[in-house]
Image: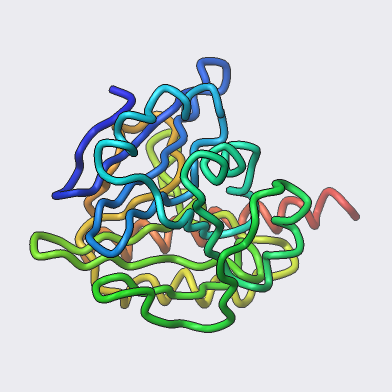
Amino acid sequence: MPIAEIGEGLFCLSESNPKTGLSHYSYFLKRDGGNLLFHTLKKTSELKKHPALFEEHGGIKLQVLTHDAEASASCEWVHQHFGAGLYLHASDAPRVARKTRCPVAHAFSSAHRVFGGLDAIPLSGHTLGFTAYKLSTKEATYLFIGDFLVPKSGAWKANVSKLLVPVGIANLNLLKTLDFDYLLPNKSKGHARPPFVLGPAERESAIDAAIAGLMKTRVGAVARTK
């Protein structure tokens, strides 16, 4: 299913790549103060299949990004049709400008409350300005995590820049302390679609395994350069 309501007023849009087996996700949040679209689907052709969802609920006010790689030509299509600019960390804004002509509506530099119930939590590591978003509703708490931590082929994988490994690992460990019910990544491979349930114990185990995999890959890369 390309669209599924995963919470009250929270929809998951998906697109799949048969060649790689990867599925990518975008999340549409309906709210009285203006609807949000988290990391717009990259395939504009897929996005164009869902205008009825956006129009039925009053359009899109902002496009929220966890980091620069989520910017694409699809963001321009959304801006042209709904006037929604981008919302992201200022550290990633220069690279966003190279990926899309969609204007930046707001670039922030620190943790803050976007509105009642949605918090921006900068977690440098995947990129310098990578930011997770925690959404608290009456029924559950969701954490939009981009591809900082993603399910892939039966395990959880951490994606950290080689220039940011120490701070990336520190922020992965910080995820263990955050209170949320469901993790919402922007992609997965070999797993059912979001939301993904990660209780405290399971979360700690998954993050520890992801960090171990990250360090193993890093050690292997260093060995190959010698």
Reply above or below: 137 against 226.
below
Reply above or below: 135 against 29.
below
Residue found at x 74% / y 56%: 97
Residue found at x 42% / y 82%: 112
The N terminus: image quadrant = top left
Q: Is residue 25 left or right of residue 87?
A: left
Q: Is residue 9 left or right of residue 66?
A: left
Residue found at x 31% / y 55%: 183
Residue 168 visible? no
Residue 196 visible? yes
Q: Quadrant of residue 14?
A: top left
Residue found at x 20% / y 61%: 181
Q: Is residue 203 left or right of residue 126?
A: left
- Residue toward you, 193 or 1: 1
Q: Report x, y in % for residue 125.
A: 60, 68
Q: Report x, y in % for residue 226.
A: 90, 55
Q: Report x, y in % for residue 170.
A: 52, 77
Q: Report x, y in % for residue 94.
A: 76, 64
